[in-house]
Image (spheres, rainbow, N blue to C red):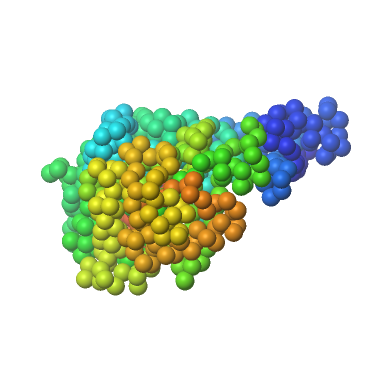
Amino acid sequence: MRQEINLVLSPKEATEEESIRNAALKALHISNEELTAIKVVRKSIDARNRRIKMNVRIEAFINEKPLQHEFNPAFKNCSNGKRIIIVGSGPAGLFAALRLIELGYKPIILERGKKIKERKRDIALLNRESIVDEDSNYAFGEGGAGTFSDGKLYTRSTKRGSVRSILDLLIFHGADATIGIDAHPHIGTNKLPRIIQQIRETILHYGGEFYFEQRVDDFIIKGKEIRGVKSQGISFEGEAVILATGHSARNIYELLHQKDILMEAKAFAMGVRIEHPQEIIDSIQYHCTIRDSYLPAASYSLVRQVEGRGVYSFCMCPGGFIVPAATSPDEIVVNGMSPSMRNSKYANSGMVVQINIEDLHEYKEYGVMAGLKYQQHLEQMTFRNGGQGQVAPAQRMEDFVRGRVSNSLPDTSYHPGIISSPLHMWLPEHIGPRLQEGFKAFDKKMRGYLTNEAVILGIESRTSSPLRIPRDKENLQHPQIHNLYPAGEGAGYAGGIISAAIDGQRIAEAIAKRAL
């Protein structure tokens, strides 16, 4: 017999197989001999009270052995399959490629950036010397923006049936099996690059093709049908084109606009990145002075409506660090990430405000591109208010809320450095004041959150795309251009690694279904 049960354990007990087994025996009222095996299905933290507990859901096997299930993707040799052009090697592009191979199609992946090894060198230069390579940075290169990120693997997507397949594929390519158990799984910026390289090897092994340092600069369109793309004068043609370029590929939006290919403006969000000492977040969330060594670095999720707009935390990185995510040398963009151990002494999070289309009246001359131009303008304003290179403008949190200039700044994980700047004065009126009110409200929920030991950095502006590339609900093609399949975050249909990967799989299946 097989039975699922929930156990409530201490953080230490939740790490010990023997303790979990003993708790299961007690809950089931059976002997040790009767309990053939146990399998942990899910773990989550209950920190509502001072005594922290772990909720552990297990599958217990009573007088029977568990079936041995191995995940074996049905990859096929696709060397002679129909060619599908994929623009972008982020999660949407890579997982579309893996699914296409299973379906017998040959993916041809074009990536504007470099392979991981070379990309690492460019990122090191960006951190150390503020040298921004516009095609090789935290946003562009093998694996897309997800490669050098926290690797968060949870999503609000309602398409939950596909999540398990994404996790299984990541485990198959080297991710730790615990991502299939943890309530809020993540991989870590130190481990993701190796996994992305393994995915590339799989695609190449089964007959797919990769082309790096190929920035797409034109589409091959005949009538109302796309036949392929051009990069540096080279044509790449196929049965369909999957556009999976991510939300930072402004040149693609510009190209679509120039060719009068339909796009839609949509709401997005911008704000700042805030960094606390991790011990402050631990003490608030775990009600302790020193965090239990069996507990992970504490995180938080905050949201508040302020004057009709959502103010909320985004991409919270416990035990992480802040990085320069600009894609042009005349802008500053900040983002956050964590290593797998989440063992930095800092905790950071984006703290952003919802931007609606009606907020952009000053940019109405740009039409559908208004949000993109506004985003770009604010990133350039941040650059002008920063220091030399990628030195970011910053302000102590309480000083920002009270409207005071910070005469000194705390230590930070942001490698290029920070410089004192009155963000409360130059952030736009529909962002700055709402953040001030939001921080006050969050302090009521998390006492001690509003503190001058925390620092805010500008600007967190790439939370999502300000544009959507529309597609038909049934066949997922662009309604105007036949065989063009917008996918992932850049198309406006995803928000993170998992949802983008799911979207890529759906696109691959839609292409195969169309051919039936």
Counting from the top left corner in percent of width and height, residue 399 is at 44, 55
Instruction: Say above or below: 474 vs 291.
Output: below
Counting from the top left corner in percent of width and height, residue 216 is at 21, 47
Residue at the extreme left of the image, as rendered: 233
**Residue in the image at 38% along x and 40% along y:** 414
Quadrant including the N terminus = top right
Q: Nearer the viewer, residue 423 or 32?
A: 423
Quadrant location of residue 283? top right
Quadrant location of residue 183? top right
Counting from the top left corner in percent of width and height, residue 3 is at 76, 41
**Residue in the image at 42% along x and 65% along y:** 433
Q: Is residue 363 visible?
A: yes
**Residue in the image at 24% along x and 52% along y:** 384
The mark tally for this picture is: 0
Image-based side of 406 in relation to 129, left or right: right
**Residue in the image at 44% along x and 48% along y:** 455
Quadrant location of residue 254? bottom left
Q: Nearer the viewer, residue 224 or 302?
A: 302
Counting from the top left corner in percent of width and height, residue 243 is at 30, 51
Q: Is residue 80 visible?
A: no
Image-based side of 177 in relation to 139, left or right: right
